[in-house]
Image: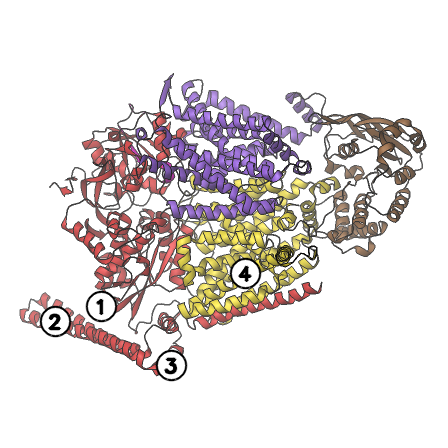
Chain colours: A brown, B yellow, C red, D purple
Amino acid sequence: MTATAADAAPVLRLRGLSMSFGGVHALSGIDIDVAQGERLVILGPNGAGKTTLFNVVAGDLRPTAGTVEIDGLNVEELPARRRPQLGMSRTYQRSRLFAGLTVEENLYLAVLGKEGRRFRLRMGRRDAAYRDRARRAAANVWLDGRLDTPTADLSHGEQRQLELGLATVTEPRVLMLDEPASGLSRGERERLTELLLSLGGDVTLLLIDHDMDVALRVAERVVVMHDGVKITEGTPDEIRADPRVHDIYLGRGISHE
Amino acid sequence: MILTRLRGDPGETPGGVGSGDYARNTRKLAAALFVALVLVGVFQAITPGVFRHYFVDVVMTRSLLFGVAAASIVFLSAFGGMISLAQTLMYGVCAFTVGNAVTTGGSKGLNLGWNPWVGVALGIGVTTALGFVMGLIASRSSGLYYLMITLAYGVIGFYFFGQVTVLSGFGGVNQVRAPAFIGEPTDATNPERLFFTVLVVSVVVYLLLRYVSRTPFGLALQGVRDDPVRMNSLGFNVAMHRTWAFTLAAFIASLGGVLYVWEQRAISPTTISLVGILNLLIMAIIGGVLVLEGAWLGAFIYIALENYVRNVVFLNNWIEEARFRTLAGAIVLVLVLACPDGVVGLRKVRGAVTLSLIGAAVWGTVGGLQEGDRGAIAGVIVGAVAGIGAAGLVGWLAGHRDTARGVWSRLLATGRPGQVPARN
Amino acid sequence: MRTVRKNSTWLRLSVAAMALALLAAACASDTGAEDADAALSAAQSARGEASTALADAAAAAAAADAALAAAEAAQAAADLAQATAEGNEAAVAAAEQALAEAQSAAEDARSQAAAAEQEAAQAREAAAAAEAQAAEAAAAPPPEPPPPPPPAAAEPTTSIKLAILSDCEGAFGAFHDRDIAGVVTAFAEHAGATVNDRTAPQAGFSNASINGVAIELVGIGCADDTAEAALRETRRLMEDIGAEIMIGPLSGDESIAVANYAKDHPHQTFVNGTSGAQDSTMAVRAPNFFRFNGDGAQWNAGLGDIAHNVLGWETAAVIGDDYSFAWTSTAGFIAEFCAAGGDVISRVYPPLNTTDYSGFVEQLPGVDEVDGYFWAVGGAGLVPALNAFEDAKGEIVGQQHMGNLFWGIPDVFRAIGPRVEGSYSGGFGNAPDLQTDKAAEFRAIINSHFDEIPFGGAPAPADAAYFDAFFMNYYNNAWGLIEGLKAIGADLSGGHEPLWEAISNVTLDAAFGEISLDSNRTAIQDQYVGRIYIDDAGEMQSSTVAFVPQVDQTFGGTFTGDPPPSRDFPPCEVRDLPWIGNATPVVDGVLQN
Amino acid sequence: MTTVMTGAVNVLLGRRGRHVPWQRAATRLLITAAIVFVLVWIIFLAGNTSNGPAVSAPSDFLKSILNALTISGLYFIVASGFTLVFGLMRTVQMAHGSLFLLAGYFALEYQLDFVGVTATPDRNQVAWADWWLPLVIGVVVVSGLGLFIQQVFLRWNQGQDLRQALITIAISIVLGDQMIQHFGGVAEPITFTHEIHGYVEFIGIRYGIHQFFVIGMALGVGGFLWLLLKKTRTGMVIRAGVDDTPMVQALGINVQKVFAVAFVLGSALAGLGGVIAGSSVTSLSPGVDGQWLLHSLVVVIIGGMGSLGGAAAGSLLYGVVTAFAPAYLPTDYAYYSIIATFVILALVLAMRPYGLFGRPA
């Protein structure tokens, strides 16, 4: 795939997406198109609805209104567990790992989840291949030395790496990362940025981050949200220049985290 | 999450479950346990008559078969993160099915009079199928909710068998035949056959569950235990994993049910009443609900106490006043409060072995002097358990030693605050 | 890390050591445990209070003498029989003479044995050497016994091990001491035993002997009203402690379990405690399970007759728990009421443990649609069911209601409350208010052996047990066993079959009427109907109002065990029951015949 | 095929413009069908049943409804305490049934003592205070015991859900055993005072005033709890605590005090239920504790944990099942009404895994 972001049909299309919990409108009328291979960053202060948006797109929550299309297919009623087969994967803001299993087993489960045939009571040749993939993916997130370590024994940084590994091991077409850099050291953030930039051109990336360094270096396009509403979108430079963004976000968000 | 909470200190590394040193040590415990069991069996086989029959025929046999049933609880909680109180019902359903299928008359129930093996197959089949249905209904719940739903299953099941007189009624099904190779109970030539059967089934179940935990399904199940939300987004059907796990547990429990009905030759609703449900849970708790081997260990300790505690004179007098179940409740209370990993967790406690050996020796001697051989056996067992309990308390105190030290320091220190070691 | 490893070593050591300890304990405990005698002597020497080898020898010698004398007596008896057949008077006289001689010889041998035992006791204190000898004797390899362990035929039985099973927990836990007291009193009265503690039945008895054979109380089992616990305790008593004969259990389901166990263990003998399940004798039919009390149907004999012929009910409705005991209980009423010409127009069986009885009580006909109601609801359901009846149908009038034995138990009918005043009730076959010599004698027997018999763990006067059917049933069952043992000279050396034969033929001249056993080994006994009244002090009491002689378990042929009583068996039909119209009125405890 | 089915179902359920996966739609359809069938059965078809179809025996139908209301009221009183404790503290109070029974026993002992009898008195002997005072005593005693349990065993295990459940299980075992020891095995009832007891008859139905009293008490408890939760500061803190305990803590409110209050309240409701039920639908005997623990469980599983409205809905539904099953099952199967309980549980869980008003714990 060599098509540029601009002329490709949107791989992900959100229309009028709304989500309310009781009386609280976490999302209202979000419209976003993401093209194949695009790297989109969603910015916004705490409580802007970024993670809710992710949850809705990933299927963990069912939207109150609006549609989610992947490759033109309506998926908003499709349970989350069906979406990896469509090429989606995501990470979570706080690591959601399998604490009782080793690094390799964590990654193996991710592969298994995508490839199907899960209720087997026998390890087969296929599983050997899955494990190979898992080990290779571990190397991608610099965890190849820790394959047999129980996840619970990993450091925080390593857990974030594994979190990323779980999302990338399935070689998704749409990769959604929820604050992957949170809690990482400066060096680790550097490596993370490199990793994200090195992703293949056909991988569509959605990224939530507070960290402007990572976000704006990685982003091709930025969407800014506030109070569940899309405020603006544009290239990183446009966003930097937008006074509204300064008002709602840069003014308070950048000093910490 | 709920399980890591059970293990006590929230500060402890979350979920060292099934991994690391904890798991490796548990493996060793398991190996030792099974070697001991096999030794008992072999010993019984090569020296007929040396062993007191009662110990093998009743205490060991019952320990192992309840161990199988308790293992299904432990399997669900250790690998699936679900505490199920429906396992007693499951072995009851199987026992009732077998009973209805094989009895020939003179008993309550359908009295179908089928071949015992057909009955066994039917019992296991029915229980497993029921396990699937019940598992499916409960599968979208988790945590405490799962515990409550399964408890409701269990209690409803008790009323069901008590009230549906076509299948059983309050008096239960009696005169259940076992297959010929187990032998009739009147035929005293080879009473340990049942023991060996139960031993073999226990070992097979243990190995099976260990094996399952390493298969794709087993690993996925552990994933569900650790983080169902993530499993869902990775593409797993969490509810179905819970359902199949519950089904497998029902299958295991049904094996326990078959063995139970072979041993008792009868099954009645009171067996699966709330008391029965809690008894099985107590066994699992004594063993430590997160360690598979603990199921058999817990069952042994419970059954041994149940059988021998009355032989210890001083305890017997106390129990006459205060009742056995009070003792059982107190044991659970102490274990849950002081030693959430169950007895298998005691290896962390320095001196547990010494204490239990001393207890066994002292009480064994006292019991032997007072009551003869039975007193000796009882004393050894009760003493060992008491030693374990004491160690648990000591260990618990040790776990809180900083607090204790803090209190002492504050009491003893003279105007030198801040000297309290704040090690954690 | 290091600590963990160290601990794991500890762990391995501990498991190994515990296993070893267990093995050692189990091995050391009893070499050759199957041999009853060897086990006995091992246990005795371990306990340091049993006979020395010397005593054994002396007792054995005496017993041998006794056996010799018994053989002579038997020979003499045979001669006598032969002579009688021939009609030779002289021979009869000679044979009688021989018999008398043999009997006195046996007497001598018996007293000799007693003396020898006494000697042995003295010798035990004096000779420490004998102790060693005893140990040696005990350690000597016993002859390899055949796998099923009946005692070797040649050796005389020196003692019989007895166990009692009762409920110390569960719904009947409060009766534990009374149950045991029943057995202890029977042995004290009929087998010369000494009551160990006149205020604590659980201390048991000692020195019981029949025909020189000691009866030793080796264990008291504690069940909780469930079959499983009863079976567990039975196995503990019989297999661990090694009892040969057990008296118990208490409740119906327990007794079915125990009867089944008995059937599977033909080298032991079981005598019921106080349970009244029909199945345990009629369906299970174990040859070694005996019951000197009636069952749930028998206990209602007389009620149907009174309902139809005294109260003039033409129609009745029955309501009972939906399980076998209540079915049996209502079956007794239905069979008799219909036999007498009445019609049962409604049978309602709410499930046990029903939370809300209103839906079931609705199914009963109204108070003006039927002449009367028979109640066989028990436990926690009885009062709520009556309350629901009041709510749905109208006030309860004593004349319109009857109950089974539950209405006859003071604690229960007092819980129901004064509204059932005037209603009739079934019973257990006891009638404490009966003014007869035998009843008075029974009461005196209890008071002569016990000062106090605790109830529910609290001290209570022994006299209170007289009113308790549980006590009476345990007493009668133990007594039946004693009579059976006496009939065979307490000689179990040939296995238990002779004992079974003997017990089957026992007839007890019991306090409230003669008790004998039918072919299913259940009592044929007299029954009494009670009626609830309120005494001058305002207390509810039950007085005996009718006496029904010799009711058997088949209920005059109504029941055969197949089909068992159920929701719709027996059907309502006019039949001939021997006791209908033959019930004797009882007024102020005096039979009016 | 799927689309057609989904579409059809959507039309049927009146869901405009939304796709519903067909499994979920089928479940809904099944449940709708089940409800419709039950209604049609009760109203028109129930021929071979003890009550008969509602159209031909309307007074029986009304009677069943009244019975259902009475038993629902009792379920509600007991289960509301259970659900309150769970909602706030995430504690499954397994000793709830034991407290229920214990309060009953205390009330019984004191009632007998006050009336001056040793066994169940006649209603006319029971004066007003001879029922109300024992009620208060029973409730106060188990409230105290509840406080003791909470302070001694549960407080320092806050947040460890399962451990707390196991602790209360152990406590219930000990309590159950000791109650047999002290109060014996004979079932005994508490007696309503004659002021409460009495009957009204209308359109051929006889209905007890005390049954109305039970309904009234349930409404009173419901109203009290509603006022407490909605209108008082404590209630607001409790509600906030249900939603987010750490947040409340962070606001500087003494959560421990609120926990203690809630636990005492929950225990008191168990005790209140025990005394009222012990005077009406049950008598006090071993095993009743487990029975009412089951009732509490079923109510909150149906209604959803931690929700007062859920407890009310669950009680009502469960009460209807309890009262209608024996009346409207075919006569031969009326004995198997326990199965109806299981079915209702299964249906609710199939549709809403956390109960009608529940949320994931």
Kind of residue sitting beneath label 2 = Ala
Kind of residue sitting beneath label 3 = Ala
Say whether marks 4 and 3 touch (CB < 8 Å).
no
Q: Is residue B2 above or below residue A62?
A: below
- What is the magenta range? C363-381
| Residue B278 relative to residue C106: left or right | right
**Residue at numbered disc 1:** C211
Question: Label 1, label 2: how many angstroms apart (C-alpha)?
Answer: 17 Å
Question: Label 1, label 3: how many angstroms apart (C-alpha)?
Answer: 30 Å
| Residue C132 relative to residue A117: left or right | left
Disc 3 chain ID: C
Crowding around mark 4 (Cα neighbors within 10 Å: few <14, some 14 to 19, many 20+) is some
Disc 4 chain ID: B
Please state which of the two labelled residues, at mark 1 or mark 3, is closer to the viewer: 3
Q: Position of residue D306 (x, y in %)?
A: 59, 34
Instruction: Give the secondary structure at mark 1.
Output: loop
Q: Along the line of sight, which residue is nearer the eye, C248 or D31?
A: C248
| Residue A206 relative to residue C461: left or right | right
| Residue B209 relative to residue B91: left or right | right
Kind of residue sitting beneath label 4 = Ala
Kind of residue sitting beneath label 1 = Asn
| Residue at 36% from the left image edge and 54% from the top image edge | C258
